Amino acid sequence: MRVVVLAPIDNSPFGISVAELCRREPGVVVAAVIVREILNWKRLRSELRRDGVRLVRKAWRKLVVRAAAREAKCERSFYDVVTELGLEERSLAGWARRHGVTFLKVPDHNDPRAIELLRRSGPEVVAFTGGGLVRRPLLEASGRGIFNTHMGVLPSYRGMDVVEWPLLENRHESVGLGVTLHFMDAGVDTGPILAIRRIPLRTGDSMERLRTRFEPVMVEAMLDGIRAARDGELTPRPQAAEAGRQYFVLHPRLYQRARARLAEVARSAAETVE
Amino acid sequence: MMRSLLRDRLGPRVEALFDRLEQGVAPAAHRALAQALLASRTCVDAAAATSAAAGLADDLAAWWRAALEGGSTGARAVEAPPGCLSDDPDCLWRASQEEGAPGIVDLLTLLPRPSTNLAQEVGLAEKLGAVAGGQPFREDALAPEAPAASLLLLAAQRAGGLSAASSAKLVRELSEGLPPRRWFVRAGTPRGTANLLRSLIAAGLPEADELLERLLRHVEIRREEALRLRTPGSVGQENLERLRYTLALLEGAAWRRDLRFLNAALKLNDAHLLTLRRTRGQGPLRNRLELHYLASVALQERELRELAP
């Protein structure tokens, strides 16, 4: 089964983990890797508009001081997955070169060159590891579809900051926190659901620790989906439009309240097993 | 080595800077501007041309002060002054044209909740019905009387001057010429629709749900480009409509207990503060802007305490 991996940047640890695990998976071939240019004015402007200072902080922490991984040392992260895989390369370009996989860097995944490469590669599925919105032509060139691992429980929590919103709305128990593997469609997180994996809260959790805990689960969920596609065992469940709501980036005042709620809840959280 | 230098030496300072920047507009900034506006009383006094309006303006200012300071506002109900709905609907109609200083009609729309002073319907329903019959809010064009109609309807609802049945009937008649998909479009938003949405919410009509959802997506996605007016007026008129839409989001948040609407309103109010600080000006429009800002920030603070304690 042929798979194409889409990644947000060349050294995306999520992207490279998925690419390598697909490569190692019997019956799966990585046909191409397509990454987005990071130093692209249009992208920077669009992401800054959406995420503001949080984006700059995220970049600072990830690229300069690796602070997220340090703070959440007790949690396995994308970086740990990459390390465990024993990969020498940290860049998808290097990885693709080593393994003879077609590599393309574009300003946006919806770029005509990316769509043309997808058509030529003929994937059965596409693994999306981040990088913005996908539009109809990209969806149509992606075989059965594009897998996405959304950091919220669908259909209830679509959109942004969906780790924080359930805490703020006090629905972290009734709906739960978790990763949803789903097919992407033209809507925002409205595509058919393939699997949901719950993420437990633990005593002493901070937002950074909690979000880090999502990372290896996202990798596992993506690979499980790819295996299921290979084995003909996908069972997509369509989402009703009215079954969930779209959420947006939290205003700092509500974000602080979500953090405070987490601190309260995590003081006495016991790990629950799904 | 460079990385560890950055991390160890600069890291804490950079993190502190990010904390400050992420905070965005500090709550204290809103309180400071609001308190300055309440202290100067320019906009409040501008609306106090009649004794009924003066009393209401004072009551509203006290409610806003209490809401901003975190005091209890629940026990304090701001009621429409008895008899404020004149038995001369034409007088009220003229007052809703917004060509002069803000007055009783404007203040009534800023009541934090509908008054329980159920005043007699005094020809308002007929007057508004006559306007609504002409479908002032239409897909293809906005009639000149549309903004005044929605303003007067909202004022009457807030004052308790319309029965629930009249209220629902009138707001449906006013809005039926403009389908929801035509409210928030690139060509612009029709002026006066913010008060129309507030009227739909006040009447508790389900049509408001779809509009609130569309509004939410529009302001969250379009950001500073959101809520441009279809018929270009002044920047001040556009800002006034935006403030009214912020009130609609806050009222929608309280109605449906939906924090997403409060979230969007918080962002909009931050933008309003920056606009008010950046722009100068005097006169009726400025006074209206300041009154609406006060109402919006006060309601925001109350809802933060109630919906997201």
Image: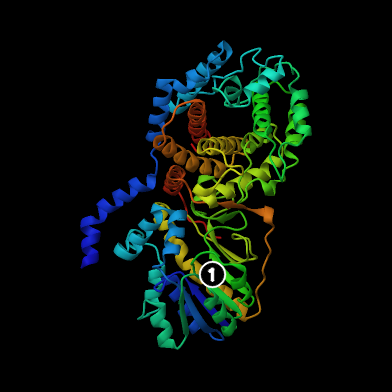
Protein image colouring: rainbow
Residue B257 falls in image quadrant:
top right
Screen quadrant of the N terminus of chain A: bottom right
Q: Nearer the viewer, residue A56 or B197?
A: B197
Residue A226 falls in image quadrant:
bottom right
Mark 1 surroundings within 10 Å by alpha-carbon count, few (fewer than 14), some (14 through 19), many (20 or more) = many
Tell me if B215 is positioned left or right of A199 in this view: right
Q: Amino acid at mark 1?
A: Ala
Residue B16 percent location from the top left of the image: 29, 48
Which residue in the protein does label 1 denote? A221
Q: Nearer the viewer, residue A264 or B90?
A: B90
Q: Residue at x 64, y 76 (%)?
A: A144
Residue B14 percent location from the top left of the image: 28, 53
Q: Nearer the viewer, residue B157 or B137?
A: B137
Residue B296 to residue B47: above or below = below
Residue B280 falls in image quadrant:
top left
Residue A105 percent location from the top left of the image: 45, 76
Tell me if B114 is positioned left or right of B71 in this view: right
**Residue A73 in sight from this viewpoint:** no
Q: Nearer the viewer, residue B116 or B167?
A: B167
